């Protein structure tokens, strides 16, 4: 592999990693704040992609889809949390079951409404070209994905450290009951968190749609990848999702190219290795069960 | 702080999410039900005039659901046109979902054999499922018309029958992967004068077989395969692979992908400017079937592929079939619908020859072997030694005609017959 090819493949890996970060961020946020493993995350991702498909088909406007999908899916999260999830607070395995159930319902409804054919969304105008970059042409859309991922990460970092919302989140992750005791409406915080996590999944669905397509089964792929990313990066922290994306994306890309037979095994080897060395994941918080 | 004890530990998370991921990955695994309902030996006696039960095993969930739906539509259309009767026997089609899972496929096959006592079986999309049910079908002496899966071994003499081998009870109305992949290799080397090619296929049974068959015939015709690349099935991100393709000098790429993979591949191919750099996309016909073309539009322009059918194929049977299908469903039929249609047509003709008798297996098999008819794909007959169809292969090129991307037939290779045994 020449240097030019290596650079191009590194870019491919980083853009895949950026996408994985966007995908896993919502899962990590919900887990960190609410202690809920949201296995409907893949279904929210799928729903986002299908809303984008419908929006692009009707208006031809990708950017509208990128706004509309997280709003709608976020609103759905805002309904699901108080209506269903809240009743099971603290009952983790029941919550896992519930989120699996929610995902099955969403996936089947999507299939019923949108059909089960494979679909695709064209790249947005302006981003469908390639630009010359060290040693060859590189697709603009992938550069956009990288930029979007970095921007989102910066926005998170800012909110997390500088805003009142960030303070609430940090406090909630540390000790939600104490936060409630201090007079914060914890129900509202949880509902908002769940909606934000769902909206993030939908954003990932829209961003991924032009590259990966829109099809039945996409929810499972996305869920497995996002679980891998949060386990490697560390549960419950956004920096963990970033680290996970940054490691898994390039590893997956180079693995596929260099040893295609072992690509999937390579990913799981990384998971096992990270868990051996750092059982909490790369940037995971030590959480002691009391 | 008592409710802290409820807090999710890392171990609980891993157990729960691991179990969920596993469940998701494996799909609805075979639930070992009480399928041991024995006494399945009561094979139908004198059957003429009695209701004819056909067990149709197709995927109605998961990635191939739309293929299953297409084949079900084709079945229903055929039976409707036949007035619900074949050779004067009223037909009941029993549909089951194989869920793209060999264990489920085998379980449903046993249900057809033991509980439903079907007279014959049809369907199956994915090759691993066809291989998985082969033994059960063969030992139950169940006539099985396989209507999609193209794994070579299913209709060949194979040592130790591993992974599979032909059976006198199994007929195939679709194709063997050799038929799709080998003739185009020869065509490229001898007729098109292509000197060098590079293979890039999906890393699973069919893709590997397809690359091997292409390589063999292309090399035999005087060409040279300069290298190969494989992508795991359902690779999602094709950019890394196309980057590799672009950084090697051979311009003619032979590919096997279908469905979502084909769409993602074609889009990545264009994003990296492969056409402008002089690279040519070629492959097995599924790469540019309608499900793919309607999504990628003109992006696959110029791709040359081989298949035994195209919606544009100009013959009376195809016109009638396409018109009827479109009228009934307001949809263009796809190649899977054709395969199912031809499977039913063969059954129909064989039943007429035996006057509706399916109990005498040998007579029914002989009748199936003797069927010859005009199919939407052209002349159709089974190879008597392998039970795989003898059929023409069309070389097709994607062109945009009045704003629509379609496969235009540029050449024909007549009466392609599978060798019936391993070719290496």
Image: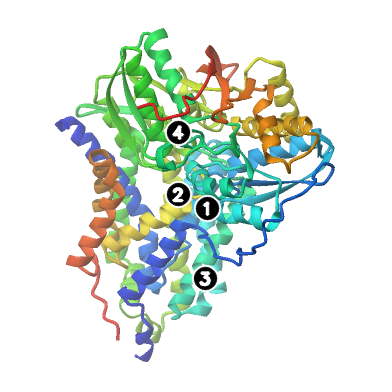
Q: Name the mark on residue B227.
A: none
Element assignment for label 2: helix
Which label sits in the foreground, 2 or 4? 4
Q: Nearer the viewer, residue B416 or A207?
A: B416
- Find the distance from the CA under tag 1 to the CA under tag 3: 18 Å
Looking at the image, which residue is at 34% across and 38% down? Answer: B231
Which label sits in the foreground, 1 or 4? 4
- Find the distance from the CA under tag 1 to the CA under tag 2: 8 Å
Asked if badges 1 and 2 are on one and the same chain, I answer: yes
The quadrant where residue A210 appears? top left
- Examine the rendering and report whether any part of residue B270 can be seen: no
Badge 3 crowding class, 10 Å Cα cut-off, few under 14, some 14 to 19, many 20 or more, is some
Q: Which residue is mark 1?
A: A47
Q: Earlier in the sequence, mark 1 or mark 2?
A: 1
Task: Identify the image quadrant of the N terminus of chain A.
Answer: top left
Q: Which residue is mark 3?
A: A98
Q: Nearer the viewer, residue A286 or B10?
A: B10
How many discs mark residues in the rendered view?
Answer: 4
Q: Which residue is mark 4?
A: B262
Label 1 marks a residue whose chain is: A
Badge 1 crowding class, 10 Å Cα cut-off, few under 14, some 14 to 19, many 20 or more, is many
Label 3 marks a residue whose chain is: A
């Amino acid at each position: 592999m020449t240097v030019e090819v290596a650079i191009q493949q590194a870019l491919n890996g980083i853009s895949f990693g950026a996408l994985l970060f966007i995908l896993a961020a919502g899962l990590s946020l919900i887990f960190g704040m609410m202690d809920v493993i949201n296995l409907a995350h893949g279904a929210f991702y799928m729903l986002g992609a299908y809303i984008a498909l419908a929006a692009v088909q009707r208006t031809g406007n990708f950017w509208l889809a990128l706004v509309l999908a997280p709003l709608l899916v976020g609103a759905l999260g805002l309904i699901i949390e108080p209506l269903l999830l809240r009743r099971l607070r603290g009952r983790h395995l029941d919550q896992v079951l519930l989120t699996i159930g929610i995902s099955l319902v969403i996936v089947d409804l999507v299939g019923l409404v949108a059909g089960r054919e494979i679909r695709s969304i064209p790249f947005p105008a302006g981003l469908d070209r390639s630009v010359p970059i060290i040693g060859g042409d590189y697709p603009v859309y992938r550069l956009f994905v990288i930029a979007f991922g970095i921007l989102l990460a910066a926005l998170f970092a800012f909110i997390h450290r500088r805003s009142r919302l960030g303070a609430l989140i940090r406090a909630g992750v540390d000790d939600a009951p104490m936060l409630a005791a201090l007079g914060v409406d914890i129900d509202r915080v949880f509902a908002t968190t769940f909606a934000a996590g769902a909206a993030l999944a939908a954003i990932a669905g829209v961003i991924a749609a032009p590259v990966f397509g829109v099809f039945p089964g996409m929810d499972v792929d996305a869920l497995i990848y996002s679980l891998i990313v949060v386990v490697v990066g560390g549960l419950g922290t956004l920096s963990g999702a970033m680290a996970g994306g940054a490691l898994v994306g390039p590893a997956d890309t180079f693995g596929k190219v260099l040893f295609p037979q072992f690509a999937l095994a390579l990913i799981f080897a990384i998971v096992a290795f990270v868990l051996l060395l750092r059982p909490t994941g790369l940037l995971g918080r030590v959480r002691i069960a009391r | 702080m008592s409710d802290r004890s409820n807090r999710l530990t890392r171990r609980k998370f891993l157990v729960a999410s691991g179990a969920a991921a596993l469940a998701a990955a494996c799909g609805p695994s075979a639930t070992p039900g009480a399928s041991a309902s024995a006494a399945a030996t009561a094979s139908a006696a004198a059957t003429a005039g009695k209701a004819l039960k056909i067990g149709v095993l197709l995927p109605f969930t998961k990635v191939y659901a739309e293929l299953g739906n297409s084949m079900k539509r084709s079945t229903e259309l055929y039976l409707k046109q036949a007035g619900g009767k074949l050779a004067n026997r009223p037909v009941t089609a029993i549909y089951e979902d194989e869920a793209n899972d060999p264990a489920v496929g085998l379980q449903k096959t046993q249900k057809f054999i033991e509980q439903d006592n079907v007279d014959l079986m049809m369907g199956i999309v994915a090759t691993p499922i066809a291989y998985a049910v082969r033994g059960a079908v063969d030992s139950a002496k169940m006539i099985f018309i396989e209507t999609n899966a193209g794994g070579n071994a299913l209709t060949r003499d194979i040592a130790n029958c591993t992974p599979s081998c032909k059976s006198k009870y199994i007929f195939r109305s679709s194709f063997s992967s050799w038929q799709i992949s080998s003739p185009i290799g020869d065509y490229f080397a001898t007729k098109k004068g292509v000197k060098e090619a590079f293979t890039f296929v999906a890393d699973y049974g069919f893709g590997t077989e397809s690359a091997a068959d292409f390589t063999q015939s292309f090399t035999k015709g005087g060409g040279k395969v300069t290298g190969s690349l494989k992508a795991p099935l359902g690779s999602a991100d094709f950019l890394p692979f196309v980057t590799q393709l672009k950084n090697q000098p051979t311009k003619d790429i032979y590919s096997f992908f279908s469905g979502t993979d084909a769409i993602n591949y074609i889009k990545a191919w264009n994003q990296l400017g492969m056409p402008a750099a002089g690279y040519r996309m070629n492959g097995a016909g599924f790469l540019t079937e309608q499900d793919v073309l309607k999504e990628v539009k003109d992006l696959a322009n110029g791709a040359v592929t081989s298949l035994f059918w195209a919606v544009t194929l100009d013959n009376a049977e195809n016109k009638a079939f396409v018109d009827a299908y479109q009228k009934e469903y307001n949809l263009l039929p796809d190649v899977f619908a054709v395969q199912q249609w031809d499977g039913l047509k063969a059954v129909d003709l064989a039943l007429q020859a035996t006057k509706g008798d399916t109990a005498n297996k040998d007579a029914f098999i002989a009748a199936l072997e003797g069927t010859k008819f005009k199919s939407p794909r052209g002349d159709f007959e089974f190879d008597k030694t392998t039970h795989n169809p003898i059929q023409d292969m069309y070389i097709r090129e994607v062109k945009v005609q009045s704003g629509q991307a379609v496969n235009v037939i540029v050449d024909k290779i007549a009466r392609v017959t599978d060798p019936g045994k391993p070719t290496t």
